[in-house]
Image (spheres, helix red, strand yellow):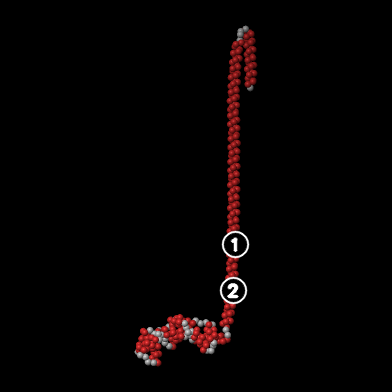
Amino acid sequence: MRTNNKFLLAAGLTIILSGCGEQAGDTGEPVLDETKVEATEVEEVSEADTKAEEEAKAEAEATAKVDEEAKVKAEAEAKAKAEAEKAAKAEEEAKAKAEAEAAAKAEEEAKAKAEAEAAAKAEEEAKAKAEAEAAAKAEEEAKAKAAAKAAEEAKAKAEAEAAANAGTVSQQQAVGMAENYLEFTAFSKSGLIEQLEFEGFSNGDATYAVENINVNWSEQAVKMAANYIEYTAFSKSGLIEQLVFEGFNNADAANAVENINVNWSEQAVKMAENYLSSMSFSRSGLIEQLQFEGFSNADAANAVTAVGL
């Protein structure tokens, strides 16, 4: 473009110079200085235009460069932003994926742990149940075995006792007679043995019989005490002595006296009457005799008064 302007300026300058030559030839006046001035002015204008054009061009180029750089920068920033967003998105997705995988893994591990614990617990419970059942079964078997053994021993013992209780014919007869005696009157253990011996049984058979009958010797003592009181008079201590004489131990004799219905004051009166029916007594002599029999001084004195002494 600048080349074209210079060409035009040169052409115009040639024309001007040609015209000036013709004019100078026509007038015969000197025109060289004026022509030079005009050429200089044209050249200055041309240079100014060129400079302006160059400055405008430079400015345009600078502007274009700035625009280009701004564009490049904007594109770079946009690209960087896009890449950053892409990276952030990728990172976020990776993070979300990692968290999801971690959560899934944790859930899987928790599930596996729970299943393992449940399985272990079930196994432990099953083991405990099996052990308990085995122990219960063993205990039941032991109990059954012990019961069977006890039953066998009881059977053997019963058979032995039955065999022993059967005794000889003489022993069986002694047992029968002992039971008959106890149906009608009271005996102590030793008294019944003596009675069976009196009936002709040996001491062994008599003892066997007394050991193999169903009898309560304490009750026998009570019955004998009641029988004695029914037919004759006794003091409390006198009746105890009589029961001991009959073969009862002191405890059974004392217990029997405490368990009969008796008025000892009345017994003193009866004994006083019995004595007076067979012999003579003074008041003091009868009181002493009743005291000797075991009555208290008060009961003895009262009895003697009651019979008229």
- Residue at (63% x, 17% y) in the render: 9
Which residue is tagged 1?
127
Compared across the picture, whether 291 is left or right of 157 comes to left
Q: Amino acid at mark 1?
A: Lys
In front: 187, or 200? 200
Q: Amino acid at mark 2?
A: Lys
Label 2: element kind: helix
Neighbour tally class for label 1: few under 14, some 14-19, many 20 plus, Cα within 10 Å: few
Farthest front residue? 203
In front: 267, or 83? 267
N-term mark: 1 or 2: 1
When asked about the image quadrant of residue 96, the answer is top right
**Image height of 236 relative to 124, above or below:** below
Which residue is tagged 2?
149
**Image height of 229 relative to 142, above or below:** below
Tell me where residue 70 appears, x and y as whole percent. 58, 31
Tell me where residue 205 appears, x and y as whole percent. 55, 85
Quadrant of the rendering where the N terminus is positioned: top right
In front: 26, or 30? 30
Quadrant of the rendering where the C terminus is positioned: bottom left
- Residue at (49% x, 81% y) in the render: 216
Q: Looking at the image, how many numbered discs can be counted on the residues?
A: 2
Compared across the picture, whether 301 is left or right of 58 comes to left
Label 1: element kind: helix
Tell me where residue 126 appears, x and y as whole percent. 60, 61
**Image height of 156 relative to 47, above or below:** below
When asked about the image quadrant of residue 92, the answer is top right
- Residue at (60% x, 23% y) in the render: 54
| Nearer mark to the viewer, of 1 and 2 | 2
- In this orientation, does residue 123 appear? yes
Tell me where residue 236 appears, x and y as whole percent. 41, 84
